[in-house]
Image (tube, grey):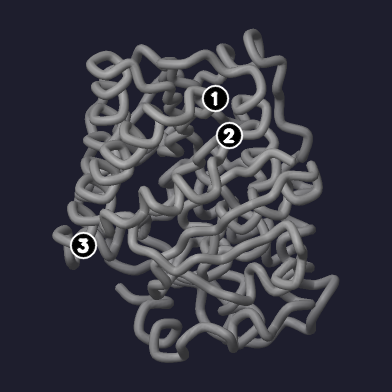
C-alpha cells in the first residue's frame, strides 16, 4: 500500500483531500501544527481508519524529515499554510513564518529524503491570488505574479522557492494554483461558511465594499480530484492552474445562499446584506485559464455551482457541531468584522 503525507490535513482542503485518498486506498499521514484553522471535526469520520495516521508537527520543525524517513511516502502534498487574507493584513509575520520559512524547511527536509528514496514527489498547493487583479481575460501558468496582500505575496514566494529547488537541486516537485474553494469543512472566517453561519444565526451578511469583487469558485472535492490526477499524471517542474471557469461576485453568492436557505429554515428579519468598509488591497477579480490541466491531465470539474452550493449549505445545516467545535471567541471575533 502506497503512503502519502498531507501537511495541513486538519484544515479545509487538506481534510477533504485525505478523505479522497483514503477512498483511493492509500495510507495517509496527516501532519498538522494545530492552529485556529485546524479542526479535528474535519477528520472525525476517519480517525479510526487503520490507514490513517495523525502527527502533530509544525512544518518549521526540522524533525519533520524523520516523518519522511519513517513512512517513506510516494508523495507529499503540502497544504500547510496560513491562508486567511484578513489575518495576513493584521499579522503578516505569521504568514512569512509559515508560508515561506515553513516551505523552506519542507524543501530542505524533502531534499534529504529524496537522496534515500527516488520514488517520491512533492506537490505544492498554492493559489490564484499570486496573480493579483485580472480585470480582463484569464491568467494562465505563464502569467506574471503580482500579489496584492501579504498572504498572496507569501504564497508567491513559496511557489518561486519550490521551483528554484526543482531547477537547482533537481527535486521532483509540482506547483498547483487553484481558484477559490468552497464546500464542507471550511473555516467560517471565509466568505461562504461565514454567510451560512450568519443566515443560520439570524445575523446580517457582511460584504466588503460594493460586493462586486469577483472570484472563480470551485467545489473543494473537484480540486482534490485534480490534485490526485496531478499526482498520477503531472510532469515534474510544471505549474498547473486548477479552476472552474465559473466567476461570481459576492452579491451573487449572497443571493444564491439566501435562495437556498428557504429550503432549510424560515428566514428571519436580521438576515440581509450589510455593506462594510472594504479591506486594504482588495483585488477586484481573479480568473484562471485552466486549459493546460484539461488538455494534459484530462481533468475537468464535475460539480456545477448550483449543485455544489446546495451540498455545501446542507452540510453546514446538518453539521452544526462543526461551528461548536471551533473556539467561540474566534467565530465571534472574526465573523462580520469590518
Question: Considering only vertical position in the picture, is 299 above or below 123?
Answer: above
Question: Considering only vertical position in the picture, is 251 above or below 147?
Answer: below
Image quadrant containing the C terminus: bottom left
Give yes or no for contact between labels 1 and 2 (Cβ–Cβ under 8 Å): yes
Residue at disc 3, secondary structure: helix
Residue under circle 3? 94
Residue 283: assigned label: none
Relative side of 212 to 54, left or right = left
Residue under circle 2? 74
Most foreground residue, 227 or 152:
227
Residue at disc 2, secondary structure: loop
User: Which numbered disc flags the more N-terminal residue, 1 or 2?
Assistant: 2
Tell me residue 119's x, y (percent). 54, 24
Residue under circle 1? 119
Residue appearing at x 27%, y 24% in the figure: 165
Image quadrant containing the N terminus: top right
Residue at disc 1, secondary structure: loop
Measured Cα–Cα span from mark 1 to mark 3: 33 Å
Tell me residue 100's x, y (percent). 22, 45
Which mark is nearer the camera, 1 or 3? 1
Measured Cα–Cα span from mark 3 to mark 2: 30 Å
Q: Characterize the local packing of mark 2: few (<14), some (14-19) or many (20 or more) Cα atoms within 10 angstroms.
A: some
Residue appearing at x 39%, y 36% in the figure: 113
Amino acid at each position: 500500500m502506497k503512503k502519502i503525507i498531507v501537511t495541513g490535513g486538519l484544515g479545509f482542503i487538506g481534510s477533504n483531500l485525505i478523505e479522497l485518498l483514503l477512498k483511493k486506498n492509500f495510507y495517509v499521514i496527516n501532519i498538522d501544527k494545530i492552529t485556529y484553522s485546524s479542526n479535528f471535526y474535519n477528520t472525525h469520520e476517519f480517525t479510526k481508519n487503520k490507514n490513517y495516521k495523525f502527527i502533530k508537527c509544525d512544518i518549521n520543525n526540522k524533525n519533520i524529515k524523520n516523518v519522511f524517513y519513517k513512512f517513506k511516502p510516494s508523495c507529499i502534498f503540502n497544504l500547510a499554510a496560513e491562508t486567511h487574507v484578513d489575518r495576513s493584513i493584521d499579522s503578516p509575520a505569521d504568514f512569512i513564518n509559515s508560508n515561506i520559512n515553513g516551505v523552506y524547511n519542507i524543501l530542505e527536509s524533502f531534499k534529504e529524503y529524496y537522496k534515500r528514496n527516488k520514488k517520491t514527489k512533492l506537490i505544492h498547493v498554492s493559489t490564484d491570488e499570486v496573480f493579483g487583479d485580472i480585470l480582463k481575460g484569464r491568467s494562465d501558468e505563464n502569467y506574471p505574479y503580482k500579489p496584492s496582500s501579504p498572504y498572496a505575496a507569501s504564497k508567491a514566494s513559496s511557489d518561486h522557492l519550490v521551483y528554484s529547488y526543482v531547477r537547482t537541486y533537481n527535486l521532483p516537485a509540482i506547483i498547483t494554483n487553484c481558484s477559490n474553494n468552497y464546500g464542507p469543512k471550511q473555516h467560517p472566517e471565509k466568505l461562504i461558511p461565514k454567510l451560512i453561519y450568519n443566515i443560520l444565526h439570524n445575523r446580517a451578511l457582511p460584504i466588503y465594499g460594493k460586493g462586486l469583487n469577483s472570484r472563480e469558485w470551485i467545489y473543494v472535492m473537484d480540486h482534490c480530484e485534480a490534485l490526485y490526477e496531478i499526482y498520477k499524471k503531472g510532469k515534474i517542474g510544471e505549474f498547473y492552474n486548477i479552476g472552474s471557469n465559473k466567476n461570481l461576485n459576492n452579491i451573487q453568492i449572497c443571493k444564491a445562499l439566501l435562495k437556498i436557505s428557504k429550503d432549510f429554515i424560515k428566514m428571519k428579519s436580521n438576515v440581509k446584506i450589510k455593506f462594510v468598509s472594504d479591506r486594504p488591497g482588495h483585488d477586484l477579480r481573479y480568473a484562471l485559464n485552466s486549459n493546460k490541466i484539461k488538455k494534459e491531465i484530462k481533468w475537468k470539474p464535475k460539480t456545477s455551482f448550483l449543485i455544489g452550493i446546495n451540498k455545501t449549505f446542507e452540510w453546514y445545516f446538518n453539521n452544526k457541531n462543526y461551528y461548536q467545535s471551533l473556539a467561540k471567541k474566534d467565530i465571534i471575533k472574526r465573523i462580520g468584522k469590518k
